[in-house]
Image (cartoon, grey):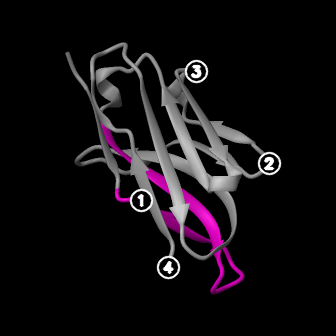
Amino acid sequence: QVQLVESGGGLVQPGGSLRLSCAASGSIRQVTAMGWYRQVPGKERELVARIRGDDNTRYADFVQGRFTISRDNAKNAVYLQMYSLKPEDTAVYFCHAALVPVSCWHPAAYWGQGTQVTVAA
């Protein structure tokens, strides 16, 4: 069984920084991409950033150079370093992985449980 476990959320003041971490565990054949999404109540979950196995990255427009996504392939882990946080960044952040479990040959999407990020004075 594959699990994604996130850590690193919390309360931070505007302009502050946070680093989110996520590790995939279980019987994994291959991880093709990992990323971060976020969601606030009443709104759809939206992409923040994602990184593929070839280190190709994609960021949402609202990131505006403030966040950096990285991954450790050996650990099946992904990180999101966030700087210059704004109150509008407040949301639950979800780790996402597109991976192939040992039990099959096709990639599937997996989600973490979410970690709260609150940006407030």
Going by the numbered disc 1, the residue's amino acid type is: Gly
Mark 2: which secondary structure?
loop
Q: CA distance from mark 3 to mark 1?
A: 24 Å
Residue 65 position in % (x across, y down) = 58, 21
Q: Does 70 sit above or below residue 34?
A: above
Q: Are marks 2 and 4 in contact (CB under 8 Å)?
A: no
Mark 1: which secondary structure?
loop
Q: Tag 3: Cα neighbours inside 10 Å, few (<14), some, or many (≥20)?
A: few
Label 3, on which residue?
A: 65
Q: CA distance from mark 3 to mark 4?
A: 35 Å
Foreground pick, 47 / 34:
34
Range drawn in magenta: 91-113
Label 4, on which residue?
A: 1
Of the residues under marks 3 and 4, which one precedes in the sequence? 4
Label 2, on which residue?
A: 54
Residue 112 got which mark? 1
Q: CA distance from mark 3 to mark 2?
A: 20 Å
Going by the numbered disc 2, the residue's amino acid type is: Asp
| Mark nearer the viewer, 3 or 2 | 2
Q: Are marks 3 and 4 in contact (CB under 8 Å)?
A: no
